Amino acid sequence: MFNLVQMSDLTDEQIFALIKQALALKAGTDRIQEREDLYVANLFFENSTRTKHSFEIAEKHLKLNIINFETSTSSVNKGESLYDTCKTLEMLGCNLLVIRHGENAYYQQLQGLNIPIVSGGDGSGEHPSQCLLDLMTIYEQFKTFTNLKVAIVGDIKNSRVARSNYYALTRLGAQVSFVCPPEYTDPTLGASVDFDQIIEQVDVCMMLRVQHERHEQGLSFAAQSYHQQYGLTKERYARLKEQAIILHPAPVNRGVEIDTDLVEAPKSRIFPQMRNGMFMRQAILSLIINENKL
Ligand code: CP
C-alpha cells in the first residue's frame, strides 16, 4: 500500500514531480484526471479549516465521491476504535482515506487496511501535505532548494509542520535554522539561534503558530514579550533580503508570531500558500490513486 503519512514516504523525484504537477495545475497547463468511480472519506478528529476544505475542493476537482465523516455523530462516540472505524469505511466501499488525528503516528494502528491513507496531520508528528504546499511555494519563488537558508521560528516542539519541513528541506539541500524559546525547543531537530543574528541572511522565514492547545494547562504566556523576542516585527521585516519570503501554515495568532500588518505584506506568502495547497492536494490524491492503481 502506498500511503502518504510522513515525508519519508516520498522519494526526491516524487516530491519534485508533485511540485511540478501542482504548479502546472495552477498555471492551467495540466488537467487532473477525473475519477467518478472512486470514494474518498475525510476523517478529521482534530479541528481544521485549510487542510479539510482544500482536500475537499481538490477531491471535487478529481470528481471523487466524498464522504465527510462526522466525528461528533459517529460511533467513535460509542467507543469504536480508529481501526474499526476505518475498516468499516473500507468495507462500505471507500477507496481512500484522508485522516487528521491528534495521536502521533496514529496510522501505525491501521496497517490492516487494504486502502491507502493520506495524512492530514498526526499530533505533533508530521503534516506532509502542508510541507508539500510549503515546498511548492518556496520552489515557485526560488526554483531550487539547494543552499536556501530557511528559518523555522516558533513552537518547534509541538509542530508537525516544523518536523516535516525540516526532514524534507534538509534532504533537498536547504540549510534550516530554528528560532524558539527554550521551552519550545526540540533537541532532536536542533538548537535555537538568535533571530536577530540570522534575519538578514534568510531566504525563507517560516513562522509557526504558538499551539496553546498542546501546552500544559496553566502555563503563563506573555504575548507581547513573545512577539518582541520571537515574532516577525516590522523592524525585522525591514531587515529581510529583497527576495525573502514569509510562510506560515496558519491559523495565525496575529500580533503574536507576526505583526498583523505583515500578514499580507509583499514578502508574505501566507494566503497564496493556502491557494497552493488546493493544487498540491490534487496532485497528492492523483499520485496516491496512480501508485495504488485504484
Ligand atoms: N495549516 C493547517 O493545517 O491549517 P488547518 O489546521 O486549518 O487545517
Image (cartoon, grey):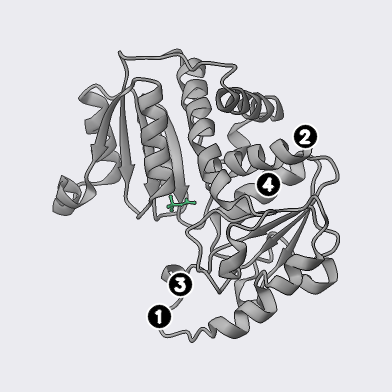
Give the residue at mark 4.
Answer: 167
Are circles 1 and 2 on residues that touch, CB within 8 Å?
Answer: no
Q: Badge 2, how many Cα within 10 Å: few under 14, some, many 20+?
A: few
Are circles 4 and 3 on residues that touch, CB within 8 Å?
Answer: no
In the image, residue 283 sits, relative to residue 190, either above or below, namely above
Q: Nearer the viewer, mark 4 or mark 3?
A: 3
Q: Badge 4, how many Cα within 10 Å: few under 14, some, many 20+?
A: some
**Measured Cα–Cα span from mark 2 to mark 3:** 35 Å
Marking on residue 142: none
The picture quadrant where one finds residue 176 is bottom right
Q: Is residue 120 visible?
A: yes
Q: Badge 3, how many Cα within 10 Å: few under 14, some, many 20+?
A: few
Mark 1: is the Cβ under 8 angstroms from ligand 1? no
Q: Earlier in the sequence, mark 1 or mark 2?
A: 2
Are circles 4 and 1 on residues that touch, CB within 8 Å?
Answer: no
Give the residue at mark 3.
Answer: 212
The three-letter code of the residue at mark 3 reads: His
Residue 161 coordinates in the image, percent (x, y): 57, 53
**SS for dot 3:** helix
Residue 113 coordinates in the image, percent (x, y): 35, 29
Q: Is residue 194 visible?
A: no
